[in-house]
Image: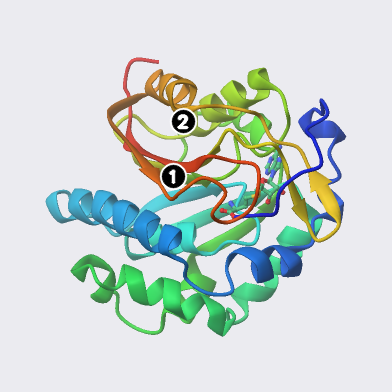
Amino acid sequence: MHLGSPGNLSQLNAEAPWDAFDPKAYVDHNYKSVIPEDREIISIVRAHFGDHFRANPDRSIRGIDVGAGANLYPAFSMMPWCEEITLLDRAEPNVDYLEAQQLGYDQDWDGFWDLFCEDAGYAALPGDPRDRFAEVTRVENGDLFALSARREQWSLGTMFFVAESLSTSHEEFWQAVECFLLALTPGAPFAAAFMEHSEGYFVGNTHFPACDVGEPEIRSAVETYAEGLRIFTVGQPNAVRDGYTSMIVACGFRGGGN
Ligand SMILES: C[S@@+](CC[C@H](N)C(=O)[O-])C[C@H]1O[C@@H](n2cnc3c(N)ncnc32)[C@H](O)[C@@H]1O
């Protein structure tokens, strides 16, 4: 995902220009087609959720995608099992984009859904996936840091390229991971993706900050609130843009101890 940076000056989440986030430029750069990294991430998340719900069937839970932005595939990953999926984002243009996609998502996303359908749990979803997306998603304009007041409200969760891509602050990175995981019920399956050692990124002509975290720091933030954690390294340095080393995917279950 996203373009590289001119340098990563210190910037807190509240200081970044979220309402200048251009979802069209973002999708054009990142999700116009399925790249090998997406394919690998989808196969990891598909197996994690598909295997869990094969052993623990349920079709009536609430899921959340935190910092959904202009990416529908984390919501796709939860679609077979959720009667409701919250798509939370603080940027108004992304909220507008998601609401427009509820009316019938763009064809670009079909290739992503098709990949999920390589698992029977997804392929068995009856009806048109566009109808299902429209029916179950609830777009919410909000701040993920406010999730600290909404503990244990969702039973399935995703957060893709958000905690490390919302400011330069390590403290905010840790807080974002904590807010995401504490919003889930104990035992809830989750998947989170991170850009490792990101130097910040452009969306169109607008620069957004990132926090430079490596695999050990990502692991230690997530494992504080998780059990059964598995960490995957995906892709090569700078394959999608300049200024990062790889993508990290963390899959597990919300731990019961916090
Ligand atoms: C790099 S984008 C990732 C978007 C998408 N999840 C993806 O996989 O491509 C970071 C997203 O985090 C959102 N964001 C940043 N700060 C946030 C906050 N405090 N609360 C909720 N969303 C936030 C941005 O609006 C943006 O959509």
Q: Residue at x 65, y 56 (%)?
A: 69
Mark 2, other Cα within 10 Å: few <14 / some 14–19 / many ≥20: many
Where residue 72 sits, quadrant-wise, is bottom right
Residue 175 at x, y = what percent?
A: 60, 23
Mark 1 residue type: Gly
Asked whether the residues under the numbered discs 1 and 2 touch, taking CB atoms below 8 Å apart as contact, a structural biologist would say yes
Closest to the observer, 252 or 85: 252
Mark 1, other Cα within 10 Å: few <14 / some 14–19 / many ≥20: many
Provide the secondary structure element on which disc 1 rests.
strand
Mark 2 residue type: Leu
Distance in Å between CA atoms under marks 1 and 2: 8 Å
Residue 200 against residue 37 in the figure, above or below: above
Residue 142 at x, y = what percent?
A: 71, 44
Residue 241 at x, y = what percent?
A: 63, 53
Instruction: Decide if residue 153 is on the left or right side of residue 155.
Output: right
Residue 187 at x, y = what percent?
A: 29, 33
Q: How is the image coloured?
A: rainbow
Q: Residue at x 58, y 33 (%)?
A: 197
Where residue 111 sits, quadrant-wise, is bottom left
Query: Residue 181 — which label?
Result: 2
Q: Which residue is mark 1?
A: 157
Q: Residue at x 47, y 37 (%)?
A: 153
Q: Residue at x 41, y 25 (%)?
A: 219
Closest to the observer, 91 or 34: 34
Provide the secondary structure element on which disc 2 rests.
helix
Instruction: Decide if residue 10 is on the left or right side of residue 120.
Output: right
Residue 35 against residue 216 in the figure, above or below: below
- Whether residue 251 can be seen here: yes
Instruction: Decide if residue 106 is on the left or right side of residue 85.
Output: right
